[in-house]
Amino acid sequence: MDRLKILVVDDEARMRKLVKDFLVKSNYEVVEAEDGSQALDIFFGQKDIALIILDVMMPKMDGWEVCREVRQYSKVPIIMLTAKSDERDELQGFQLGVDEYISKPFSPKILVARVEAILRRTNQLGEEEILEAGGIVLNKSAHSVTIDGKDVELSYKEFELLTYFLENRGIALSREKILNNVWNYDYFGDARTIDTHVKKLRSKMGQKGDLIKTIWGMGYKLEV
């Protein structure tokens, strides 16, 4: 399979090199742009960009403008990098169709994990139909789950929840993020519904339920 191509856009050469080095180690091809205008030229010129990592604060054209322009023509996944952790910025990003939002400074390993999770979710890694980890095998098209070879009966929401954990294994997920992705943005219920579903899911998974770790005050993480 050809290596997926990722466009890294940041006006700081040091930051681009850091991100590029980690992505190349994970077998991605990386192209770089130092400002928004150059990023658009590359994106529309190359046609095979699988994902964009985009800094917000840049000269000539900032990340928001680049995102708006790209979204008129493409649903390519976009990860925004920002020096500010401002909720208004984050909301603006999601309204523009940003897939993920990461505040600087960040761990490059976490960035790569987020990239892989998004590419799995958008089916670009070609692994979307069957997800496997720690003896858990989830088949999305057949809507079935086996653990150590034994069938496990899950409700629709438990299945969706386990799918989301497997797609984002190793990443800490807040209750809000789980609600938004598994119950969708139009769900205005109580975040405690997640705790109830996780409890039931763990129970059905037997010993493997311990793989779903509680992160106190935040949410959960599937750690294999």
Image (cartoon, helix red, strand yellow):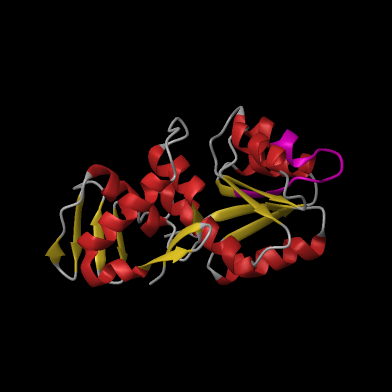
x 42%, y 49%: residue: 121
Please state which of residues 110 and 126 is positioned toward the viewer in this rendering: 110
x 39%, y 57%: residue: 165
Across and down, in percent, residue 181 comes to 44, 43
Across and down, in percent, residue 106 comes to 68, 63
Across and down, in percent, residue 2 comes to 47, 59
Image position of 164 (left or right of 44): left
x 59%, y 68%: residue: 109
Image position of 207 (left or right of 35): left
Across and down, in percent, residue 26 comes to 53, 68
Asked whether 54 falls inside the magenta stretch, the response is yes
Q: Quadrant of residue 150?
A: bottom left
Please state which of residues 123 and 93 is positioned toward the viewer in this rendering: 93
Farthest residue in the top direction? 72
Asked whether 101 falls inside the magenta stretch, the response is no
Image position of 15 (left or right of 157): right
Farthest residue in the left direction? 150
Please state which of residues 59 and 158 is positioned toward the viewer in this rendering: 158
Magenta span: 52-66
Q: How many marks?
A: 0
Image position of 201 (left or right of 5): left
Q: Quadrant of residue 190?
A: top left
x 71%, y 55%: residue: 32
Q: Is residue 18 above or below residue 31?
A: below
Q: Quadrant of residue 186?
A: top left
Farthest residue in the right direction? 59
Quarter occupied by the N terminus: bottom left
Quarter occupied by the C terminus: bottom left
